[in-house]
Image: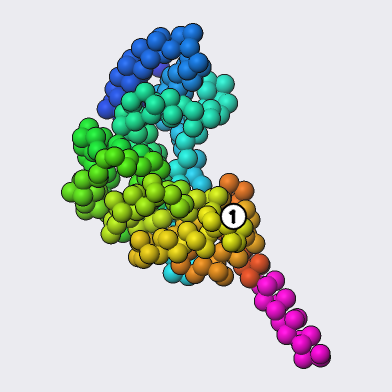
Amino acid sequence: MQTSRQQQPETVQDYDTELLRRIENLIRSFQKHVRDAEGTESEEQMVYGLRTLVALANMVLHKQDVFGIEPWHIISPYAPLSMPGEMLLRVKDFKGNPMAPYPAIMAFYETGYTAQIDAILFLVALGQFERMRKAGTKKQVSINISARSLRDSDFVKATLARLESLQLNSEEKIIIEIHESSPHLAMSRQVLELYKMLDVGFAIDDVGLNMNDVLRLAEFEGLAEFVKIDRHSVCAEEGQANSLDQVMSFVRTLMPDALAVAEGVKNEEHAFEIAQKYPDIQYVQGLYLTSDRDDFKLAFYNVDKADGLSNASASGMDEFA
């Protein structure tokens, strides 16, 4: 006798119960701040943070990708990673509309939930990485967190356990991008070494020329593999106090072995100019650059080719002078 469709056992969903528990606990805790903010200037931000977290929970339940990937495009033949990319938060509401990430994240940071939201986002990112590795689409990603979270024992335990379970192979790489510093709290070298033992890298994000950057670089000296140069410096005019030349000199002094990534690059011509002037910058990243690596390579090569033809033409004209 055949079993009716109604009587057939339902497929059990493979949910990340630890992650869902963390999200539920943060929703419950954060609701108090939303209630307390009623009628105040911060009410809108608190409500927005809560809405974003609920939307994120819905995407996790449906195994939807919460992060977009912005490539680090290669501009140097000595770049060690073949296809790295930054995971950027891209939560969508129930209508499918994107929700701006920065105000939501700051709602949690400013109310003392830095480690809690960072742990959730880190675990979500690793879950998406696992799906991507199965599909063979991505092998090397960077994930943003605050340096303060590396001082939180729960964050450290949860992320180290999940990273260890991934068992990264030689072609894969997880990079922790430190996007916010904690100058009043020293990092535990022992904790940072635990991440390094799992082949996890560190990148210092948005490096410019202020005292905060000096402290961040000093904390991660000998551990950070990458330094990401702030877009304001990358796009600054030569001769300005925060120009790329000044920042690169600063980085070379404090972290001579770190590889540089230029952020906020405008186009392939800009990328080519950076490659010519700063051979120790290995990668470029930018909102207006194509997300297709092959398209970028082709356009970048065409800039090189056009520059070569221009130089050859100028040399020919000199011969006739």
In the image, the segment drawn in magenta is: 305-321
Task: Give x and y (percent) for residue 79.
Answer: 44, 65
Quadrant housing the C terminus: bottom right
Task: Give x and y (percent) for residue 141.
Answer: 41, 49
> Compared to 117, does 144 lie above or below?
below
Which residue position is annotated with label 1?
236
Residue at image point 66% right, 67% down: 302
User: Which residue ends up furthest to the right in the rendered image?
Assistant: 320
In the image, residue 161 lies in the stretch drawn in magenta? no
Is residue 120 in view?
A: no
Quadrant housing the N terminus: top left
Name the amino acid type tagged 1: Ala
> Compared to 143, does 27 lie above or below?
above
User: Which residue ends up furthest to the left in the rendered image?
Assistant: 190
Please name whichever residue, 105 or 84, is drawn nearer the observer in this view of the structure.
105
Name which quarter of the figure residue 63 lies in: top left
Task: Give x and y (percent) for residue 210.
Answer: 43, 49
Task: Give x and y (percent) for residue 147.
Answer: 32, 41
Name which quarter of the figure residue 148 lies in: top left
Q: Main secondary structure of the magenta part?
A: helix
Residue at image point 51% right, 47% down: 70
Q: How many marks?
A: 1
Is residue 125 in view?
A: yes
